[in-house]
Image (cartoon, rainbow, N blue to C red):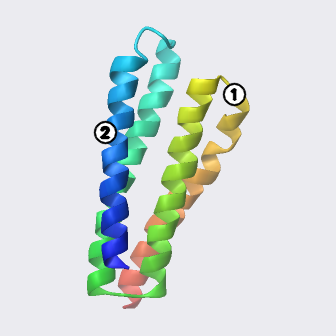
């Protein structure tokens, strides 16, 4: 699993850079300053948690457990739901997507908690 999470982390970071560049260069002047801040928040959390997947890969190689595997999956879900909902909210104007964002945030929080638990218990 450690190789899988390292690969997903690298691909997520790659996509984070692409999305961030798109936001900085392609959306500037097309979105309100508030929407740009929302988009940048999505990119920031996307990148933090892409790097977090490398922490999961490392922990899974040292302390393999179901909790470390769960942590990786939760971070993946969190990136997709948290950052993805912010990207979609800004790009589509569908403000109801803001109600989905906290679900992704909870997945990110649970992912870090699962990682801590997995390392502690191993």
Q: Give residue 63's position: percent from left, percent from top.
A: 32, 87
Which residue in the rendered view is the most extreme toward the bottom?
122
Name the element at disc 2: helix
Q: Is residue 48 left or right of residue 69?
A: left
At a point 69% along the width and 27% down the height, the residue shown is 94
Q: Is residue 36 above or below residue 9?
A: above
Which residue in the rendered view is the most extreme toward the top?
29
Quadrant for residue 92, please give it.
Answer: top right
At a point 29% along the width and 65% down the height, the residue shown is 54
Q: Nearer the viewer, residue 30 or 34?
A: 30
At a point 50% along the width and 28% down the height, the residue shown is 38
Label 2 sits on residue: 17
Q: Give residue 1's position: percent from left, percent from top.
A: 38, 79
Q: Earlier in the sequence, mark 1 or mark 2?
A: 2
Name the element at disc 1: helix
Q: Is residue 43 above or below residue 113?
A: above
Of the two numbered discs 1 and 2 in the rendering, the one whose residue sits closer to the viewer: 2
Q: Give residue 96's position: percent from left, percent from top.
A: 73, 33
At a point 38% along the width and 27% down the height, the residue shown is 22
Disc sitting over residue 30 in the figure: none
Q: Is residue 65 above or below residue 56?
A: below
Contact? badges 1 and 2 (CB < 8 Å)? no
Label 1 sits on residue: 95
Q: Is residue 51 visible?
A: no
Q: Is residue 92 above or below residue 110?
A: above
Could you tell me which quadrant the C terminus lies in?
bottom left
Q: Give residue 12's position: percent from left, percent from top.
A: 37, 52
- How far, Cα to Cα, is label 1 from label 2? 25 Å
Q: Give neighbour class at mark 2: few <14, some 14-19, many 20+ (Cα, 10 Å).
A: some
Q: Is residue 118 left or right of residue 80?
A: left
Q: Is residue 96 visible?
A: yes
């Amino acid at each position: 699993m450690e190789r899988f999470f390292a690969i997903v982390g690298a691909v997520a970071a790659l996509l984070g850079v692409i999305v961030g560049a798109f936001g900085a260069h392609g959306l500037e002047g097309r979105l309100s300053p508030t929407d740009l801040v929302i988009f940048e928040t999505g990119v920031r959390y996307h990148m933090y948690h892409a790097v977090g997947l490398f922490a999961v890969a490392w922990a899974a190689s040292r302390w393999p457990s179901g909790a470390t595997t769960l942590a990786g999956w939760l971070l993946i879900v969190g990136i997709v739901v948290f950052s993805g909902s912010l990207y979609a909210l800004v790009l589509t104007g569908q403000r109801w997507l803001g109600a989905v964002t906290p679900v992704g945030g909870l997945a990110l929080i649970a992912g870090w908690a699962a990682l801590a638990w997995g390392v502690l218990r191993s």
